Image (spheres, rainbow, N blue to C red):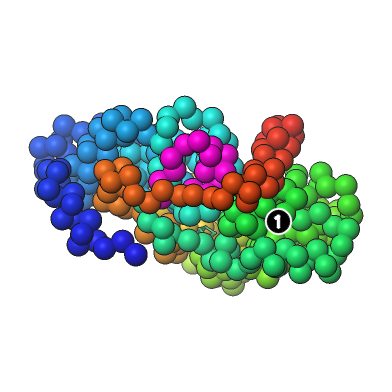
Amino acid sequence: MLDITHVRSVLSDVYDLAPSATLANEMKDTFARMDRVVSPPDWAIYAPYVRAINALKKERNAVILGHNYMTPEIYHGVSDFVGDSLQLAIKASEVEEEVIVQAGVHFMAETSKILSPQKTVLMPDMEAGCSLAESITADGIDEMRAKYPDAPVVTYVNTTAEVKAASDICCTSSNALQIVNAMESDTVIMTPDQYLAQNVANQSHKNVVFWPGSCIVHEQYTAQDLRDFREWNPGTQLIAHPECPPDVVAEADYSGSTSGIINYVHNVKPEKAMLITECSMASNIADELPEVDFVGPCNMCPYMKKITLEKILYALHTMDGQVEVAEDVAKKARKSVQAMIDLSRKLGI
Ligand code: 13P
Ligand code: SF4
């Protein structure tokens, strides 16, 4: 576990990280990307970290891959690329820098390492896990294979390298339906998200059997919540991530991956929108969509929220938090992830 007192003492010996209104003003162009959701005093706190990280990134020949659930100061301030799980996985296989800092959760960093074993992949906090990744081990995949011997295993990227290695192909929320439909067998095993699997099953002709895992953020929403919200605030577009239970997705106006949601809001520009997903999503796009009023709710992912500017700076400064995947596991896991990327490209996703 990261000792934050130690982190602060190491950083304060080297960097001037005191809040600075002067620096905040000098960096006003960066602030303009988030000034609808971040207050000027908070920006004065963040600006010294953003400056230090961006300078250190160049020294270390590093790139920061930021997931759509990062907080705005990470998403807009220091990330070189932002996106959903599929986009970040593809980016990890393409970037030229020697160091990848994963501003996201551990399974994303492992995916980057699997795809770029020669690179140093840094995880700013090793405890940034995922309830889905924790819900299954490779034994769980064996269990499903024993029950459905002829069915291929399609595994969500929100899993450990060992689980990916034991699977046939990976998927993300932006390609799950197409990947399942592309399988030859009539029965397809999906792990570990029961809700994503059921949402896919509702749109597919396949017999989808699944593992009972779930996301602790999205499982909290209920269809009744959405109906109550519509009644309370009529005219709001309800937009849900497919990790939500199927009755929630059925109640929503649109469902898609985090980038699918962002694209939808950009295209439709609803007067009022409620994003049924992690809290930071709405904050990250609030400034680029001033005409959209983002209303309620704010469920945070406790794992994603472990990533902070301070921990990113510490990781880049010390080069601690390097993610390793044993080569025998990585080799098999790479096959599953690469099969997903290749099929997605072929299908034009
Ligand atoms: P996507 O960004 O692929 O939609 O995934 C959401 C998620 O929960 C990642 O942890
Ligand atoms: Fe895992 Fe859910 Fe957090 Fe995504 S939002 S990292 S699926 S717990």
Q: Quadrant of residue 249?
A: bottom right
Region in magenta: 109-123
Name the one closer to the observer, 40 or 317: 317
Q: Secondary structure under badge 1?
A: loop
Question: Mark 1, residues whose alpha carbon is within 10 Å: few (<14), some, or many (≥20)?
Answer: many
Q: Residue at x 57, y 62 (%)?
A: 133
Q: Which amino acid type is shown beneath numbered disc 1?
A: Ala
Q: Residue at x 74, y 32 (%)?
A: 346
Q: Quadrant of residue 65?
A: top left
Q: Is residue 226 left or right of residue 21?
A: right
Q: Quadrant of residue 158?
A: bottom right
Give residue 315's position: percent from left, percent from top. 32, 47
Q: Residue at x 75, y 50 (%)?
A: 168
Residue labelled with disc 1: 166
Name the one closer to the observer, 55 or 186: 55
Can see residue 321?
yes
For the C terminus, the quadrant is: top right
Can see residue 63?
no
